[in-house]
Image (cartoon, rainbow, N blue to C red):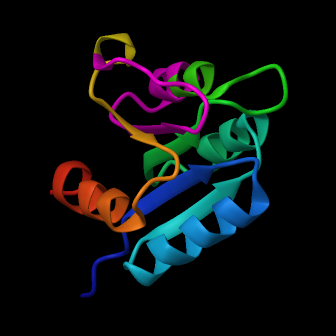
Amino acid sequence: MIAAPRSVLVVEDEALIRLSLVADLEDAGFAVYEAAGAEEALSLLSTHPEIEALFTDIDMPGSIDGLVLTQRARQSHPKIAILLTSGYLKIDKSELPPETAFFSKPYDVDHVVNHIRERVFA
């Protein structure tokens, strides 16, 4: 029996960045869900319990930013892996939620893929 691909949710309001990352993650063998904002992401999390990792931008339009999204995601999915990114904010590791990775934009997609493979789905 072939194992199902591991599932990642990408949350990014910049469409070109999101589409590129989704394609790269799919090429790497992951099942990828995508959302343009936090509200859409929370809806996907509630209907897809198989999602195991959340890669989200911090700065997004709407009333919920990426940091609040990660808090809500952990409430409903306590074991979900969290990866944050931002092109504007520089965050010290001590300010991150526990067990959270941070990637400054522009990030190296291979580095993100390897992090997910080696640290999230190891």
Question: Which residue sits at x=60%, y=43%?
Answer: 45
Q: Quadrant of the N terminus?
A: bottom left
Residue 36 colored in magenta in the image: no
21 versus 53 height, above or below: below
- Magenta residues (range): 71-93
Question: Which residue sits at x=63%, y=40%?
Answer: 46
117 versus 13 height, above or below: below
Q: In which quarter of the image is residue 65?
A: top right
Question: Which residue sits at x=55%, y=66%?
Answer: 21
Front-lying residue, 67 or 75: 67
Question: Which residue sits at x=82%, y=19%?
Answer: 63
- Relative placement, left or right, of 17 versus 70 is right
- Relative placement, left or right, of 15 versus 11 is right
Residue 80 colored in magenta in the image: yes
22 versus 29 height, above or below: above
- Relative placement, left or right, of 74 versus 12 is left
Front-lying residue, 78 or 119: 119
Residue 38 location, x and y as percent? 71, 35
Q: Residue furthest top?
A: 95
Residue 90 location, x and y as percent? 47, 24
Q: Quadrant of residue 97?
A: top left
Total numbered labels: 0
